Amino acid sequence: MKAESQVNFRMPTELRDQLQQSAEVSGRTLTAEIVSRLTSSIAMSASDATWRSGAQFLQAAELAALFGERIDELQKKHGSEPIWSWPDHARGEYETLLVARKKLWDSREQLRRELLDSLASL
């Protein structure tokens, strides 16, 4: 037998009436209607979190790719010159991009794990 708890709470009469109508249409008791709606709401919240994690994962990957393209452009522009001989602005941009790309890859890995965990819990 499932463990159940009794919960007493107040709600606006209009809301109760709407829930009662929905319960009658769906052939459920008022309690079953409320439980069904709360369960669906919680499941949708988990699903929304999964989609947000997925979107963040893709954004991090896209940004890392863009940073990689700019790093490649700087390397091609300056050829085989050692980085210490590059102009200050190019060297600064290059180093900043390397650090930012590393951080994005790290966060992407964390987002990947969160996404997999979220998918597993659905």
Image: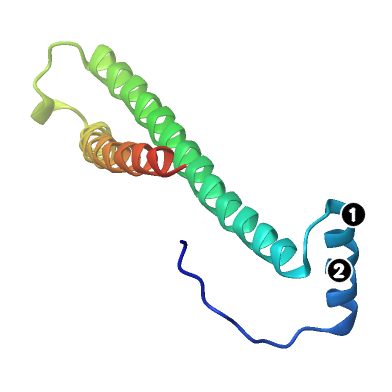
Q: In the rendered image, which quarter is residue 9 located in?
A: bottom right
Q: In the rendered image, which quarter is residue 120 located in?
A: top left
Q: In the rendered image, which quarter is residue 38 located in?
A: bottom right
Establish if 83 lies above or below 11: above
Name the one closer to the observer, 88 or 59.
Answer: 59
Give x and y (percent) for residue 78.
22, 16
Give x and y (percent) for residue 12.
83, 84
User: Residue beneath label 2, please?
Assistant: 20
Name the one closer to the observer, 29 or 115.
Answer: 29
Q: For the point 31% across and 23% down, which residue is it?
A: 68
Q: For the point 83% across and 61% down, which residue is it?
A: 23
Marks 1 and 2: CB-CB under 8 Å?
no
Q: Which amino acid does label 2 sit on?
A: Gln
Give x and y (percent) for residue 108.
32, 37
User: Residue beneath label 1, please?
Assistant: 25
Establish if 29 lies above or below 72: below
Give x and y (percent) for residue 80.
13, 11
In this rendering, the count of numbered labels is: 2
Q: Is mark 1 on a helix, strand or loop?
A: helix
Establish if 116 lies above or below 75: below
Q: Is residue 80 left or right of 39 when viewed as pictured? A: left
Name the one closer to the observer, 79 or 24.
Answer: 24
Q: Judge the density around disc 2: few (<14), some (14-19), many (≥20) Cα neighbours within 10 Å.
A: some
Q: For the point 64% across and 86% down, which residue is it?
A: 8
- CA gap between label 1 and label 2 equals 9 Å
